Image: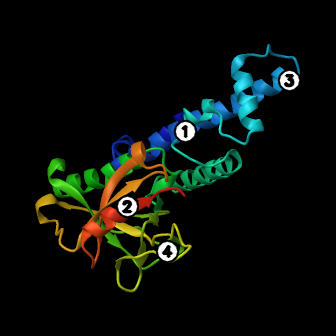
Amino acid sequence: MVDLYGKVSEESCVQPFTAVALQECERMNILIQEVRTSLRDIERGLKGELPWNEEMDELGEALALDAVPQLWSSKAYPSLLPLGSWFSDLLHRHRALHQWVAADFALPAAVWLGGLFSPQSFLTAVIQTSGRKHDLPLDKLSIHCEVTKKMPDEFILTPREGANICGLYMEGGRWDFAAGCIMDPLLKDLHPPMPVICLKSVLSDKVDVRNSYSCPVYRTRQRGSTFVWEFPLKTNEPPEKWVIAGTALLLQV
């Protein structure tokens, strides 16, 4: 982390998006260090170089069952993935974060929201950045969502205002690219991917809530305590329909 802080100026450190990236790096370092240390310890325990303990026992049992050890999940993020998929996902998150840092903390063209330890912090940074730029009180601002018709690989530049996010899936509905609104889901397509969403911060009293559904965003299919935010999405149907259908956006499926 010393090297990371050395890459940014004191002024940049207090910029909302840069602060989020640094916090993400810190949490990623803690998690990876825990994974490395615990695996090294259990290897030494099997060789007889360290006394076997209850922690090693729990770790070994979890690995044998293809489950994420509690020792790791306690320092990670909500996830329902089995161990193999979880580890691949961890590597993906590390690569995405490394690319962000390698670009001198310049905001990516589209940020993988589900790849963050704290997506709420990133969404708050969208509001903070706009509030500072336009000298507006943060408690008067809300998130406005503009769902694009493009996927992440079609974006090269960051938006002049706000941020692009990607990697979301819809459950209990689907996004119609042509109509630009929520539609009934297709058979056997339980979690269709969303296109890139452009987030901007606007004054709360200027938000047009007509023909929109306050779609909850969750980190996993478990929902509940994994709630992140609510995104206003366009709909040609009464919003109550999507409430009854349990329509939501998920950051991981």
Q: How far apart are marks 2 and 4 (CA)?
A: 25 Å
Q: Distance between the residues labelled 4 and 1?
A: 27 Å
Decide which of tag 4 and tag 1 comes sooner along the chain: 1
| Residue 236 percent across, percent down from the top left | 27, 79
Residue at the far top in the pictured view? 51
Decide which of tag 1 and tag 2 comes sooner along the chain: 1
**Which one is nearer the viewer's eye here, 139 or 219?**
219
Q: Name the residue under label 4.
A: 151
**Above or below: residue 250 compared with residue 173:** above
The colour scheme used to paint the residues is rainbow
**Which one is nearer the viewer's eye here, 59 or 117?**
59
| Residue 176 percent across, percent down from the top left | 41, 80
Task: Residue type at mark 3: give it.
Answer: Leu
Task: Residue type at mark 2: give it.
Answer: Gly
Decide which of tag 4 and tag 3 comes sooner along the chain: 3
Task: Residue type at mark 4: give it.
Answer: Met
Q: Distance between the residues labelled 3 and 1?
A: 26 Å
Q: Name the residue under label 3.
A: 46
Tell me the SS state at disc 3.
helix
**Above or below: residue 143 compared with residue 54:** below
Residue 73 lies in quadrant: top right
Residue 162 seen by the camera: no
Q: Mark 1 points at which residue?
A: 76
Q: Residue 246 carries which label?
A: 2
Direction from residue 125 to residue 210 in the image, left or right: left
**Which one is nearer the viewer's eye here, 80 or 251?**
80
